[in-house]
Each structure stands twice: as structure tokens, then as C-alpha cells.
Amino acid sequence: MPLMLLCPKLFGQDKDILITGKVSFVNSKNIYVKFENTKNINIGDTLKFLNQEKPCLLVQNKSSKSVICISLFNCEIEKGAIVYHNYTNNDSKKEEIDKKTIIIENKKIIKNIEKSEKELDAIERIRGKLSVASYSDFKPSNNNSHRMMYRFSINAQNIDNSKISLETYLNYRQYFQSKDSAVRQRENVFNIYNLALKYDITPTFLLTVGRKINNKTSSLGAIDGLQAEKFFGNSYVGIIAGFRPDINDYNFNSDLLEYGGYFGRITNNQNFQSQTTLGILQQTNKGLIDRRYAYFQHSSAVLKKLFLFSSMEFDLYNKVDTLTSNTIDLTNLYASAKYKFSRKLDLMVSYDSRKRILYYETFQTEIERLLNDNEARQGLRLRLNLKPTKFLYAGASYSKRFQSSTQNKSNNINAYMSSSKIPGIGGRLSINFNKNTSNYLESTIISIRHSRELILNKLSADFYFRMVDYDYFNENSTNKQNYYGSSLSLRISKSLKFNLFGEMSVISGEKNNYRINTSISKRFKNKRKTKIF
């Protein structure tokens, strides 16, 4: 547990007591600090780091063993850092504490805090999930299909209280096909979506080896290889050297070498938090340049009301008929803004403009055709969320897809209403409406869903009805479908759950189709292995 260090006051009977704690979590808004207890810490108090005169944290809220703070004076705050709070104890009725406990020289205090900080830097935390699921479709044409899905994920931080961490997400699929099926596919598919080892050389310098998506450069996708990142205060730099997963089966492909770097900055104060990254990457195919581009990613929160996000990619290279040139072409752009008017109302707007990604060596045999048909597909979306009462939620959104050639255009309207507590019945009721209009089709979907617990904390059920109406312009025909479904979720234990799902689809002029899915999942996590807590 965190150390509680007691220091004598130089004069008088009052005692200055020094309580130390550890920063346990940092996000864009708050800093969480854990203490042995917080009975002598009040909301509005400040906390300091060792050897710093200015306070760096202001206490906003607290529980019996933790406090929630905001940053002051742009202090650099890292997870695992030791902070202290000093208060005066003037209760003369308290028993005299042994002098060996209360008389501690300043050097000894620093030594104990530094020792504790090293032990607290690496605390083992392991979380994972293993699941097995089956999916079966029964169709009147006897073209039944069945498949199994096995998933395993784990996030092991600071294994055995070391500086090494492991994370992985594995997926294995089995397809059981009918002998009469006209379309044959692979019967066994194994994919590694994430498998990486991380080594924290120092609290501000880390290395990652394996397959991983970098959160600061998420538009790049997964990278097979080495990633290194170093912080300098609130600024950071990173390098990437590895391979792209194969574009056909997502397996490792040593022909697709890529490398590059990025830099960025994090800002974290009471009224403004942000993270901005800018980088450049070159991707090759058998040693030849496939793509070279720059990327930009930014997220920020202003006054805890306005939330911004943007991502851009600029292609810097093209090659047609062996002629290469270095130009700047905005390939992808996404920007969104969300504003919280209050706890009951927020509005979001987003815009995107995306072109097909061109890899000049991978697609060299058809690059001219792709260039001629690489018009930017654009989209605009508005979304409004309401919470008029404690148990009632509602919202609506409008999205539009468009491009100058009018191909792939669509308009989509969606609205929903949900009540988490139905008077006299209980459970949760949700109603959703969706209408989409494109060049060739107009669809209307209305769905109603009711969820409730049958046995408290053990068995829950879900019932729904969905009506779908398709109107094809080119064929001058309509297609109406009704879906009736239900699912049961059994909580066998705190970490073990079983799910059963069934659905019947009724299509006009055809026989009914049926689906049955099952799954069982096991979650696991360890207790923190540390000498401190």
C-alpha cells in the first residue's frame, strides 16, 4: 500500500503529516490518484510532486481510497508518478507516536518514495476473453450453412511485475459447406488481428514488436514489425519499421515492407485537452515504392463541451507508365465535431471525403483504369441525441453520400427512442426507424425490441420484431420481409456466460428461413501482483 510518512513540525504541538499516493490512471480529462485512505484530503486541496514547489493537481472528487483531480500549471503527469499531500494534525488528545516513526530526515523520505515509485511502476494486470460461437442458417432450398467461430484475446500488462506487456486478438473460423453448394470457399480461416509485445524501457520510452495498430496513427492499420515511441514532456516522436499484412488473406507478407515516423504533442489542462500527430510513411512491394504518403490525426476537447476529431492522408507519389512524380493529393479526409449543450442534449456533425487507395506496384496492371475511376466519395452526417427524462432516450440522424458523377449517392434518415424503465411492465423498450434512398433502391426498416431480466443477475431475454420493405426502381418490384427473433443470456458465473439466439424471417412469396446462433464466453483477469497494494 502507498507509504504514509509522518514529519514533526519545528515548533508547537501540531504535527505536519505527509501522505503519499500514486497516479493510477490518466485520461484527457482527469487524473486519478490512489491513497491508503483519503479521510484527511478534502475537495479543493492540491497535491504536489516531489521536489516541486508548485502544486500540480487539484482535487475535484474523492472516494475512500482514491481522488479525482485536474491538472494545474501544465504539469507533466505520468501514470505511476508519486504525489504527496501535507496536512496539519492538531489533535492533542491523540496518543504520542513513536519518535522513530515520526522523526524521518528529508533524505530518508526521498529514498523511500523513490523506492516505492520503482515498485509501483510495474503492476501486473491481466484481462482476457475466450469465446466459442456457432452460426447456422436453415433455408428451404436445402442450401443450409454452418460455421464455428473461436476468439481469444488477452491484454497482459507488466507480466510478473516486469516492464514487458503482451496483447493479442486471435480469430479462427470453420465453414461446413453442403456438398451441393455451387460456391466453394476456404473451410478453415485463421487470422491474427493483434499480437504484440511491449517493453517499457523507461516510463517515457517504449518499444513494441509484433502486429499492432498504433492508436496515435490508427489510419495506418496493423503493422507487423517494430514500433518505438519516446516522450519529451508533452511532445513525442515515434518510428515504424515493418510490413503490411497481405491484402488478400491478412497474413504476414515479407514483400510489403513499410517504414516511417511521426511526431506529436499532447495538451492537458483544465479547459483544453488535445492530441495531435503528424507523420510520413513509405510502403513498398518487393523493394519498389507502392505508396508514399503523409498523415495527420487530431483530437481535442474544449471546456468539456466541444469534442473535435480529424484525420487526413496526403499521397506524395504516383507512377503511371514507368513515369513517376511527387505531387500532393488529398486522398482521405474525415472531420467530426460534437457539442454537448447539456447532459440532456448533444449534437454531432461529420464530413468525409475518400478516394480509393492506389498501390502502384500492387495494382500496376490496372492502375490506369483505377485512376480514371477514382472520384472522391463524400459524406455528410448530422446526429442529435436527447435525454428528456431519466429513463428516456431519443435521437435522430441524417446522412448523405454524394459525388459529382451522382454514382453511389444515398440519403439516410434514422430515428430511435428507448426507455430503460417501462411503467408497469419493466425491462427496456427500443423503437428504431430507418429510411434509405439510393440510385436503385428505397428501403424502409422499422424495428421494436424489448429486453428484460427473467432471473435477477442470472437470466435475461431479448425479443424483437423487424419489418423491412425494399422497393427496387430499376426492376419496378418490391420485397417485404418480416423478422421475428429472440435471445437468451445465461450468466453461469461471474465470468462465464452462455447465449442462445433464434430468428425466423418471413419473405413474401417464399418459404420461411431460420437462424440459430449459440455462444459461450469466459472472461478472466488476475489480481494485482504487487508488494505495494
Image (cartoon, grey):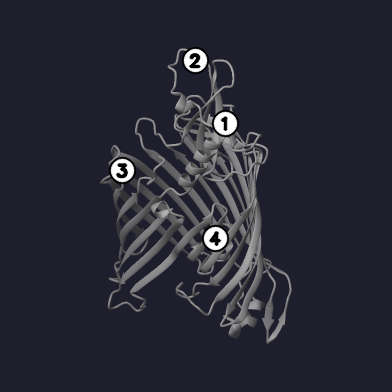
Is the Cβ of the residue at disc 2 closer than 8 Å to that at disc 3? no
Task: Tell whether 363 sits left or right of 249.
Answer: right
Mark sitting earlier along the chain (4/3): 4
Q: Position of residue 285 (x, y in %)?
A: 57, 80
Q: Position of residue 50 (x, y in %)?
A: 59, 38
Is the Cβ of the residue at disc 1 closer than 8 Å to that at disc 2? no
The residue tagged 4 is 214
Question: Which residue is at a point 52% across and 38% down the rendered structure image?
Answer: 32
**Badge nearest the viewer, 1 or 4:** 1
Q: CA distance from mark 1 to mark 2?
A: 24 Å
Mark sitting earlier along the chain (2/4): 2
**Badge nearest the viewer, 2 or 4:** 2
* Amino acid at pointer 2: Asp
* Amino acid at pointer 1: Val
Is the Cβ of the residue at disc 1 closer than 8 Å to that at disc 4? no
Q: Position of residue 252 (x, y in %)?
A: 46, 74
